[in-house]
Amino acid sequence: MTGKVILVGAGPGGRDLLTLRGAEVLQSAEAVVYDRLVSPDILELIPQTAERVNVGKENNHHPVPQDQINEILVRLAQEGKQTVRLKGGDCYLFGRGGEECEYLLEHGISFEVVPGVTSALAVPAYAGIPVTHRDYCSSVHIVTAHARAGKPLNIHFDALVQTGGTLVFLMGLSALSEVMQGLLSAGMSPDMPAAVISNGARGNQKQVVATISTLYDAVRAAGLKSPALIVVGRVCELHSALDWFTPLPLHGKTIAVTRPKERIGTLSKKLRALGANVIECPCIETQEIEDTALLKYELTDRWDWVVLTSPAGVSAMVHALQRAGYDLRALYGMQFAVIGPGTAQALAAYGIEADLIPDVYDGAHLGQALVDALDPKEHVLILRSAQGGSELTAKLREAEITFADVATYETIYRTDQGDLLRTELANGTLDVVTFTSASTVRGFVEAVGDLDFQAFTALCIGQQTAAQAQSYGMQVKIAKTATIDSMIACLLEE
């Protein structure tokens, strides 16, 4: 059967501005053809099994020409794949989406269009500029300031000036001087407010607000780069009063989050809500251990306590029991000790309340809390990663407490964002890297290689994680308590 092609507008920024329908079709895609400016956190929604084709389109640089993109879409559909064509902003606004749909139609390929949030409206809003306002204007006009190679701009400046409306020029940074001069020549007042907004609706957004006679020099002085758009109109005067985005406390900071993919969302969302430019780069994966022979053997003995050292260990425990032919009833009568509130929450999802949580959330303090709470005759079953540290077991061994240490999962060091991280480090644009375990530190180092680890702040969830970061020469900040909220509070103290 021939597949279907769905054009999806990815919006101007991250996942927060992707439509629900866009996310839905992306998560069920069998192939995705995407442009360069699509945010990495949106690409994370693509299934691992889906074929990915990066056509890399950007202003004045098309490594894959449009005719080849059209052919790729038809080929994938003819292979029977449900294909998503993922485009920045909105599919039909200067994105050549109409041309792609015409080509699909000519070749008998069914298609659907999922509109996206356009940068023409969203980016000014993120800069405190409403494109319409009853006290200033009654219309908005969206214009491409990108000309075909070797040809002049095809813009009717006289008509635009006569409208008296807000003008939004997309893809126009390289033609900024020509656009401003065109408006001046058409009779627009030199004092008309105007703005350029770079990386709009993202945590590294920058903007310059001036007048059409001074904007070009101001933008050059500020060093703004593409992607950027131009806004011209009296509504730009509202920027200083209505700018809600750039005053956010973490705006302008680029922060890499290295947590495992299945747990990365909570920290990333909170950082983005505070204005940060977040790079999601899971540096470790958890891989459950299929062989349950050791677990089955240990369950023949009597245990008084089960110890879990991570949220991943909770689900790994449940799945290991199932593979061994048991369920949670095999742990009936046992008490549960966990390393921290995150693990306790994961355990509570299965209807089990933790009986012991240490005051400090690391292996050494968990071990000491067990030693203080246990009768010396009680036995402890530890279910954790194969790479678990020695601090926990050292405390139990020192107190001569009987225990078994069973690995239910392994920690694998890998990331798909190694190239991006190295680029950010090389450019000096990475401000903070968050680490929630010593293994995330090791995974990060393995991903980026031998680089300058003093160029950023390592935000660590606890002392053991910080010690690992310091061993690589990183400058560390340590959360007061081992929680996500405490990490963020530590970051806000700067």
Image: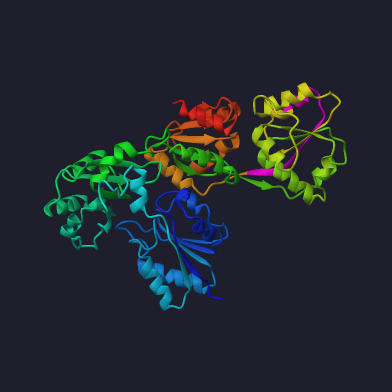
Colour mapping: rainbow
On whether residue 397 falls in the magenta region, the answer is yes
Which image quarter: residue 363?
A: top right
**Picture coordinates of residue 325, whole percent (x, y):** 82, 51
| Residue positioned 49% across, 53% down in the render | 43
From this view, report whether residue 398 is shown above or below residue 418: above
Which quadrant, please, contains the C terminus? Answer: top left
Q: How many marks?
A: 0
Residue 97 pos. (x, y %)? 38, 65
Residue 180: give x, y in percent of width and height.
18, 50
- The magenta stretch spans which residues? 394-411
Quadrant, the N terminus? bottom right
Query: Could you say which is closer to the camera, residue 37 or residue 188?
Result: 188
| Residue lying furthest front | 134
Task: Answer whether residue 450 is visible to the viewer in this image.
Answer: no
Picture residue at 75% right of the left edge, 45% below the top? 318
Residue 379 seen from this side: yes
Task: Pinpoint residue 248: horizontal percent, then vertical percent.
Answer: 41, 35
Is 429 situated above or below 463? Answer: below
232 left or right of 35?
left
